[in-house]
Image (spheres, rainbow, N blue to C red):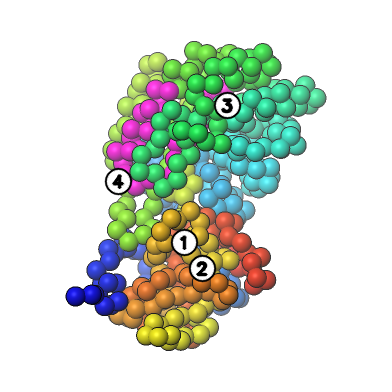
Amino acid sequence: MQKTTAHLVHDLPQHAPMTQFPVHHGELVVGGERLATLAARVGQTPFYAYDRALLRQRVADLRQALPQEIKLHYAMKANPMPALVGLMAGWVDGIDVASAGELKVALDAGANPHAISFAGPGKRDAELRQAVASRVLVNVESFREVGILAKASQALGLPARVAVRINPDFELKRSGMKMGGGPKPFGVDAEQVPALLSEIGQAGLNFEGFHIYPGSQNLNPDALCEALQQSFDLALRLAPHAPSLMRILNLGGGFGVPYFPGDKRLDITPVADVLNSIVQRALVEWPQLVLVLELGRYLVAEAGVYVARVIDCKHSRHQFYVVTDGGMHHHLAASGNFGQVVRKNYPVAIGNKMDAACTHVTTVVGPSCTPLDVIADRMKLAEAQVGDLVVVFQSGAYGASASPQGFLGHPACLEVLV
């Protein structure tokens, strides 16, 4: 017998509990403010809100779990909001940027240039010159970049600080997005690295180390442990080809957060154990080596929410739709159009009715005239009415800056740090 829509929804796996934000009298509390008050304070919907206490706690918890020798860098591509970057710059050991625009934000935020690294497969000549002038570490990702950096060094009278981003000969298994292994535009294939290192030496660049980032959004600790160990071993194999001692090794990150039904939170304990063994090996084999863990999403995603207001409710052939003033133009990832092959729902709630029973099968959509503008597809939510506030959790990373905010001319959203 064919199941009804209600049964199908009921049978789906559930989201991991979103317990990081308190609830007061049925209303979500973000940054110490009840949601309706926060919306009034912001002055409009939609908006993103990032809870600074949760951001600080995530960094503190991670430092507590990891070996103290591991340096923690924030990959600001996850969330480049200037106020947030300013906070993170004071809590972490370094900032990783992916463009000259991000470099400016990091420097304006007071990040130490010596602790800023610049990665990306398409660095323009002017960006490489800016990086040399700013005295930041450039992760070299092609043979072309060596000559440009050498010319910039000579013209500016400053030695270009470089690391080599390696495209490893392995993949991060069960990764949401594979950034290494096989043919990739990122970095230099491991087998080509010795030749690149020779060119770096001949050009007189200041070689400092390696950067290896096999993948991202991984919730499997065994896969992460294996990739970290393989990354360290690969760096040790290639280090003898370098023109000078390896002083820094960026092991990447890839720590995931639970977005979709059935996702389980990452168990950090085994990852910390492997990192501790790597630290112990490094102390013996490479005592001068600084080990870096580069994380973006894991540090900020769970501290953020996206909030939109219900502007209409309607039925269409037995399906209930809630239409909001926000959508894919602000939160492309939640709509499923930012890398998902099969669309899955982010955790969503009616933020001013958190204590109401979630019994209404609801599809939440945005105002755009496209069927792609879906924020929640047939989820069980509290009964929504015009004026209610829809909340999308796990929205602190790859939200506003990763979305086409100019799409169809709808207003841009605001971001607040609370």
User: Rounded to the nearest whole Å, what is the CA distance between mark 3 and mark 4?
Assistant: 30 Å
Is 404 magenta? The answer is: no
Say whether disc 3 or disc 4 marks the residue closer to the N-terminus: 3
Of circles 1 and 4, the one toward us is 1
Give the secondary structure at mark 3.
strand
* Residue position for label 1: 336
- The image shows residue 289 at horizontal and vertical percentages of 47, 22
Any mark on residue 267, and which? 4
Q: Does 241 sit above or below residue 352?
A: above
Say whether disc 2 or disc 1 marks the residue closer to the N-terminus: 1
Which residue is farthest right? 155
Give the secondary structure at mark 1.
loop
**Along the line of sight, which residue is nearer the eye, 28 or 271?**
271
**Along the line of sight, which residue is nearer the eye, 343 or 16?**
343
Give the secondary structure at mark 4.
loop
Quadrant, the N terminus: bottom left
Residue range (magenta): 208-234
- The image shows residue 148 at horizontal and vertical percentages of 72, 27
Q: Amino acid at mark 1?
A: Gly
* Residue position for label 2: 372
Q: Amino acid at mark 2?
A: Leu
User: Rounded to the nearest whole Å, what is the CA distance between mark 1 and mark 3?
Assistant: 35 Å
* Residue position for label 3: 163
Q: Amino acid at mark 4?
A: Asp
- The image shows residue 25 at horizontal and vertical percentages of 36, 79
Q: Is residue 110 visible?
A: no
Quarter assignment of residue 341: bottom left
Q: Badge 2: few (under 14), some or many (20 or more) residues near its Cα, within 10 Å?
A: some
